[in-house]
Amino acid sequence: MANKGKRVNMSYRILGEGKPVRLFVAGLHGDEWKDTSDILENIEAPQTGTLAVIPLVNRSNYISTLDDRYFTEIGTSIIAAVEELKPEVYIEIHSYSAENLKKLTEPERLNRIGVPAFSRLDNDVLLGSVSPYIRRKYFPQEALCLTFEIQKDNNLSKKYAMKIMERMKEFTSKEDFLDCMLKRYPLQAQKAIEDYRNFYGLSHEEI
């Protein structure tokens, strides 16, 4: 696999070079870094384009990324990287406790907290949207912005998430991702498309 070297910024590490630019972040709050940071610490450069990684954003404080304060307080390094790099692909890697699985995936989540429910992939890896705050304010409509949640204390979940990240770092656009998802996870992909349309108020002909 190509690895064109590593360049380190104060807040992120660069793998590869050129377009497209992808930004992956982990260890966003609380003790999530214990489950997620090493995924990005060990990831290699994509075959084409650039991958910027922030393996550890914050190791102690917990503010939900759905709270606007997150990105103005403990998550400022993410915003700085987004503004500087202008990534076409933005991925957050979180972790969750098994007892919260139902709460994260129930349809009522949209009415309860204002964001769509996560979709369940293999080995209890969850797929969902990022915070509306960062999505609307810092990314164009055509950008691919996703959250993946790993189940804590589940080695299979973590290993599968690592495989997903290896695949995600090669995607060059939202369309590439959706094509892959429609083949592997058709129901989850359709939900992701519907969530995206609803988020932007698009018609069924637009995506």
Image (cartoon, rainbow, N blue to C red):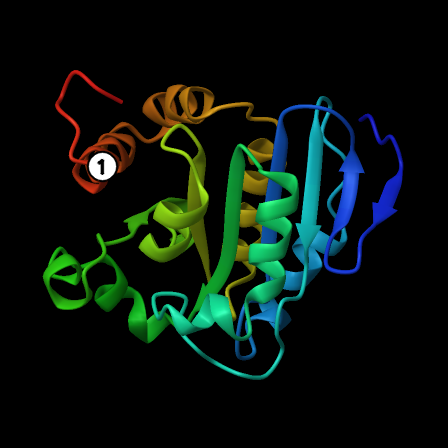
Residue at x 23%, y 56% (from the top left corner): 115
Residue at x 86%, y 44% (from the top left corner): 7
Which quarter shows the N terminus? top right
Rendered location of residue 83, percent (x, y): 59, 47
Under circle 1, the secondary element is: helix
- Pick out the residue farthest to the bottom: 60
In this view, 153 is above or below 12 = below
Rendered location of residue 127, percent (x, y): 37, 47
Name the side, left or right, on which 6 lies relative to 129: right
Name the side, left or right, on which 26 lies relative to 100: right
Residue at x 53%, y 79% (from the top left corner): 30
- Residue 128 seen in the current view: no
Which quarter shows the C terminus? top left
Query: Quarter-wise, where is residue 106 in the image?
Result: bottom left
In this view, 77 is above or below 13 = below
Rendered location of residue 35, percent (x, y): 59, 67
Q: How many marks?
A: 1
Of 96 and 14, the residue lying toward us = 14
In this view, 201 is above or below 96 = above
In this view, 20 is above or below 168 = above
Name the side, left or right, on which 50 lies relative to 158: right
Q: Which residue is disc 1 drawn over?
A: 200
Amino acid type assigned to the residue bearing label 1 in the image: Tyr
